[in-house]
Amino acid sequence: MAVFGKKETAQAEFSVLPRHLGIIMDGNGRWAKKRALPRTAGHKVGADVFKKISKACGRIGIKEVTFYAFSTENWKRPKEEVETLMRLFYDYLIDAKNDLQVSGDLRVRFIGEQEGMHPKLLELMRDAEKETASRSGTLINVAVNYGGRQEIVSAVNRLIAQGKSSITEEDISSMLYTTPDCDLIIRPSGEERLSNFLLWQSAYSEFWYSNVLWPDFTEKDLHQALSDFEKRNRRFGG
């Protein structure tokens, strides 16, 4: 009789897994409002859920997961809320070394524009990436100061700087923050839109929506999304 460890058992639950999973972490503010709490309280709980779901994705065996944490448009939010989000990023990065060690073989990478980010945050991001770069487990992309349109513009500008006179789809794909197309995008909170997330990579993505707000999102919800995904007949535009 075969004996499975935790990771092998999780992988055995699904016959098909997304190679690249995208998650739009949405609903923190509404979660807090329902409880008569400041929006910042929702973000703090949401940050804990991010850590739990990251580890769950690692146990399941998904190769790459991109979490939408802070968009280029989020700078327009109230100053206090933005400062809280930046503090959460800072706290996460300070704790990242020990937390990621506990999380096994997770790798972490931060994607997005560096302009406007505090130098200390950028330094901590680079440190976290270096400390986990040699690992072979799930790659966790954290999209911070990220916008899908800006990602495409930046990719094209880099190709122009290289002297490209004719640009192909493959050229653009090679210059994006995440190389593989996204197979499945999960968005909780009841909203059904991309909100400038992985615009190029989502051309043939499957989508899974839930009315659950992100702070209430659990591993059970993740499993439900993955179970639904493996039943779908993907046609890739055909």
Image: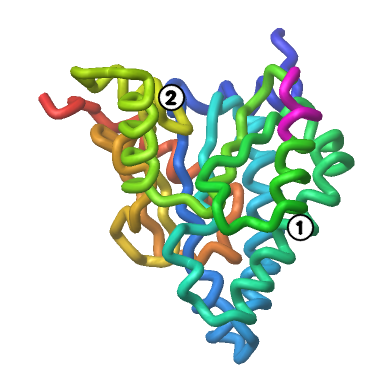
The residue positioned 39% from the left and 41% from the top of the image is 151
**Range of residues picked out in magenta:** 129-134
Name the quarter where the C terminus is drawn: top left
Residue kind at label 1, given as amino acid type: Tyr
The residue positioned 43% from the left and 24% from the top of the image is 179
For residue 103, above or below residue 187: above
The residue positioned 36% from the left and 55% from the top of the image is 209
Check the image and tell me how it is coloured.
Answer: rainbow
- Side (left or right) of 148 relative to 29: left
133 in the magenta segment? yes
Residue 82: mark: none
Q: Secondary structure at mark 1?
A: helix
Q: Which residue is mark 2?
A: 179
Q: Secondary structure at mark 2?
A: loop
For residue 133, above or below residue 78: above
Place of residue 111 in the rendered image (x, y in percent of width and height, measured from the top left): 54, 41
Place of residue 67 in the rendered image (x, y in percent of width and height, measured from the top left): 53, 46
Disc 2, disc 1: CB below 8 Å? no
Place of residue 2 in the rendered image (x, y in percent of width and height, measured from the top left): 70, 10
Decide if residue 66 is in sight here.
yes
Q: Which residue is mark 1?
A: 90
**Mark 2 or mark 1: whose residue is earlier in sequence:** 1
